[in-house]
Amino acid sequence: METPRDRMTQLIRWYLSAFHAGRSSDIAKKPYNPILGETFLCFWNMPDEKKSNDLSEDGPVAWSSKDNLSFIAEQVSHHPPISAFYAEHFNKKISLDGYIWTKSKFLGLSIGVHMIGQAVVSLIDRDEDYILTFPNGYGRSILTVPWVELGGKINISCAKTGYNANIVFHTKPFYGGKKNRVTCEIFEPNEKKPYVSIEGEWNGVMYAKYATGMNEAFIDTKKMPIIKKCVKPTDVQTEFESRRLWKDVTRSLKNKDVEAATEFKHKLEQRQREEAKERKEKGIKWETKHFHEVGEHWLYDRPLLKRLKSSPSGTQG
């Protein structure tokens, strides 16, 4: 996009469309608990892009090409349970660097999950950083049929251009009202009135009303194509990559053997406890693989901007 306004609008279009993909079911389920040191690597073939053989060997996923969107995540802390993640598209010079962890509390018949952390989307050719945060999650009706919803206020801003947006994920009122409502206002620098207001359902259709009088369907998540991620086969993954680490649990769940799945899960968690105890006794600090802590934030060790700067020609060698 050529203008700061169009870039902010497009970033909001991406952000608001990102949540519908999280789960196909409304019913809350017990998750796999990430293990300290666990990693996950994958990439996506972008639609309408040529297949390139130019591998991004210095990137987070060495077997992906410079036309792919590559992704890496690592469980960098167990207490609190922090997941750090990074994505990039080399040829578009776009990256995302983020981390997230949760604090849960009981709210009567609900569980509130407070999402702590942030992500930064960097448009490297424009020298623009967009800082964004995440909505909270709520598990409702935990004694009957549990269901999940999002709630909370989000701000997205770009210090360089001055554009910013306020997003509200609305929780369903006790009586009446719709599930999954979201509203958003996007502002030009130093303006009190938004140039566009968006509302709808984050897992359905969202509509935009512009200050110019124009209206449009902003996002229709039902019409968005599903692009599957590409992951190395489990048998060639390293020991701590997610699918290999959890393969016995996954196989048991696919076979509907919940007892075996629980047993394998317990073994992994027990090993983690024993290793933590051993480190404590020996006074050894846990070393992360791909991310490091800077103040209160977690950052990827080798982001695209850093690699471009260290390359002699300004491009990847």
Image (cartoon, rainbow, N blue to C red):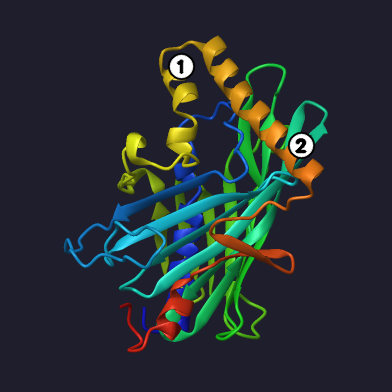
Disc nearest the viewer among 2 and 1: 2
In the picture, the disc for residue 277 is 2
Three-letter residue code for mark 1: Ser
| Residue depicted at x 58% and y 61% | 291
The quadrant the C terminus occupies is: bottom left
Vertical arrangement, residue 192 with respect to residue 289, above or below: below
**SS type, badge 2:** helix
Is any atom of residue 30 visible in this view?
no
> Label 2: how many residues lie within 10 Å, few (<14), some (14-19) or many (20+)?
few
Q: Residue 252 bears which disc, if any? A: 1
Q: Amino acid at mark 2?
A: Lys
Q: Residues within 10 Å of mark 1 (few under 14, many from 20)?
A: some
Q: Which residue is at the front of the view, 199 or 249?
A: 249
* N-term mark: 2 or 1: 1
Task: Evaluate whether residue 53 shows in this view.
Answer: yes
Residue 125 image position (x, y, % from top left): 40, 84
Residue plotted at (51% across, 75% down): 211
Q: Nearer the viewer, residue 222 or 282?
A: 282
Q: In the rendering, at what x and y percent does residue 46 appear?
A: 27, 58
Residue at the spot 47% in from the left edge and 52% down from the top edge:
18
Quadrant of the rendering where the N terminus is positioned: bottom left
Q: How many marks?
A: 2
Give percent across and percent down for residue 137. Answer: 66, 42
- The one of 317 and 124 positioned closer to us in this rendering: 317
Locate residue 52: give its quadrant: bottom left
Q: Relative to 212, is 289 on the left or the right?
A: right
The residue at 60%/85% (across/down) is 189
User: In which image quadrant can residue 2 be found?
Assistant: bottom left
Contact? badges 2 and 1 (CB < 8 Å): no
- The answer to whether residue 45 is above or below residue 144 is below
- Please provide percent x and percent y for residue 312: 36, 88
